[in-house]
Image (spheres, grey):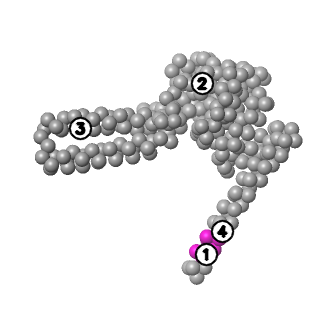
Amino acid sequence: MTRFISTLVVLCFIGSQSLIANSKDKLFYDAVRAEASGDLLTAIDLYEGASKVSKSSNLHGNLANLYFKTEKYGKAVLNYRRALLLDPGNRAFQENLNFALETAGVNFPKTDLSIYLNSSSIDFWIISLTSTFWVGALALAFLYFQGWNQKKFIFPILIWFLLLCFLFWGAYTSTGNKSLLTREVIVTEINENESNASQNIPLRRFAGSGSSANTYVKPGESLWLNLSSNSLLQSHKSLSGQKWFLVQSIDNSKKGWVKSDAVSFLTRSE
């Protein structure tokens, strides 16, 4: 009986995975067909649906292209950035992103997110740091038992220490960049009182539509959510149920409260 139940569970799991895969593929190819027929809005809805069950650079790249064609520059930038996170070396995505940023009148944030120090390189730095520590320690112990005097140890210890410092810096910087990436949001919507997609969005002094604006940001700009003293994202829910985030630019020149539905997280779908 137990064996039968286990087999049934496995078959149900395989079946559900197959259905999810088929649903994902169907949404994607339906979106491609809708795009080819010129029905861009339907294609966008289908790509968005596919993005909820699957992540691929081509999917986000196609979605970004459609948003750019429909002049939704904030969402175009968002999806080009997501495509590049999945395929960092894709020159076409990078060129399209640069053009979208230029069209939107937005400067790309100056963050230290090179391929050697981004969130995906953390494992490399930690493994290298751990390996270097133990290999160096064992090598020095071996040399000690070989009868090396103290003067001979100065140079190899110095090299070992400097290498450990460099690797620790790489691990620390990559970890910090990962944290920064998880807090990054892209401005994607226009002010509800404006009809022009080029209009700026206010960052308010307090979490409420009636509050005055500290400054303004454009669709496509990157902002970072502030952390409270207990390392939680600073947010507030108004009496109407609207959620607000306290955000700032990377150089802290812009800061204020923004509606949650006016921004989208870079590293996850809402």
Locate the C terminus and report the quarter of the image it occupies: top right
Task: Give the label on residue 246, or none.
Answer: none
Q: Secondary structure at mark 1?
A: helix
Against 35, is 217 above or below?
Answer: above
Is residue 193 or residue 81 the one in the foreground?
81
Residue indicated by mark 2 = 108
Is residue 151 or residue 24 the one in the foreground?
151
| Callout 1 touching callout 4 (CB < 8 Å) | no
- Badge 4 or badge 3: first in the primary sequence: 4
> Horizontally, is 63 left or right of 162 in the view?
right
Task: Give the label on residue 7, or none.
Answer: 1
- Badge 2 or badge 3: first in the primary sequence: 2
> Horizontally, is 148 left or right of 134 in the view?
left
Q: Residue furthest bottom?
A: 1
Disc 3 marks a residue whose amino acid type is Pro
Q: Residue at x 27, y 44 (%)?
A: 136
Specify the segment rendered in magenta: 5-12
Residue indicated by mark 3 = 156
Residue 192: % across, % down = 73, 26
> What distance separates the C-alpha of mark 1 from that of mark 4?
9 Å
